[in-house]
Amino acid sequence: MSAPASVFASDADSFLWWDWVARHTDEVGERTLEHLELTGIALGVGFAISLVLALVALRFRVTYPPITWVSGILYTIPSYALFGFLVVITGFGTVTAEIGLVSYTLLILVRNIVAGVDGVPAAVKEAADGMGYTPWRRFFTVDLRLATPAIVAGLRIAAVTTVGLVTVTALIGAGGYGVFISDGIDRNFSTPIVLGAGLSIAMAVAFDLVLLGCERLATPWARRRVAR
């Protein structure tokens, strides 16, 4: 069934053409999956690498400054410059996008993991050692768990940052909501720009709320402390 003429008339002067959005719902779903995939892979790989780097830094303190120095340099490189440089080496596509996206998560996550573990009270560590915990068992079952608030705080920042950066990866053929934004800019058409930007913001907020919920579930002692 075709839309009334009044709808098209109102859309013609609108900042957001709802008729155009309705005709592109399949593409919206496709771009949403692409954006989720790019963000999820970047966060997962970035966290795994950061955890290893944090372990090294905690075990050998002399390595912490160079680790944060290198990851800090990567974090300060403008996204356009980094992706442009990577395209020359790895070409267009997902691999190039993920290399860049992962590199932007390292500084945030490494710092928060190390800070969280350092913040675990010495008395708790001594108690775990006295109960016969091996260093590795204590790290994964005691230190990391008590460091959860700091670690999740880092993940929340990294997630929101990554969702925003994924919009840039459309320039190298990786997909996501950035495709809408690029299309709107090329055609001087506001609707796909507003749609892409709006959906990116919504996804960033959703990631933040989900991670916040995960933190509350993983730290019941914090909820009990607040309740008192």
Image (cartoon, rainbow, N blue to C red):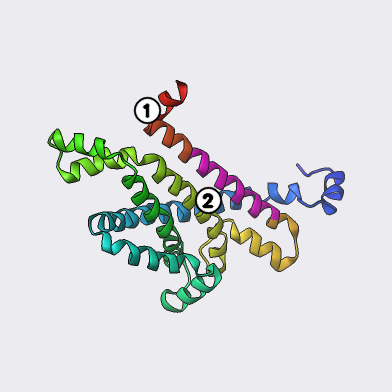
What label sits on residue 221 in the rendered view? Answer: 1
Q: Residue at x 47, y 67 (%)?
A: 93
Task: Give the secondary structure at mark 2.
Answer: helix
Q: Quadrant of the C terminus?
A: top left
Residue 68: image location, x then y, percent: 38, 63
Q: Does the magenta segment cover residue 19?
A: no
Q: Is residue 43 left or right of residue 62?
A: right
Name the amino acid type tagged 1. Answer: Trp
Label 1, residues with CA under 10 Å away: few <14, some 14-19, many ≥20 = few
Q: Residue at x 60, y 61 (%)?
A: 179
Residue 77: image location, x then y, percent: 50, 70
For the view shown, which residue lies furthest in the left direction? 132
Q: Residue at x 41, y 74 (%)?
A: 90
Please identify the quarter of the rendering in which residue 48 is found: bottom left
For the view shown, which residue lies furthest in the bottom direction? 88
Q: Is residue 19 left or right of residue 61?
A: right
Name the amino acid type tagged 2. Answer: Val
Q: Mark 2 vs mark 1: which is more N-terminal?
A: 2
Residue 111: image location, x then y, percent: 39, 54
- Range shown magenta: 194-210
Task: Give the secondary structure at mark 1.
Answer: helix
Q: Nearer the viewer, residue 21 or 130?
A: 130
Q: Residue at x 84, y 53 (%)?
A: 12
Q: Is residue 123 left or right of residue 199?
A: left
- Identify residue for label 2: 160
Instruction: Establish if 138 lies above or below 80.
Output: above
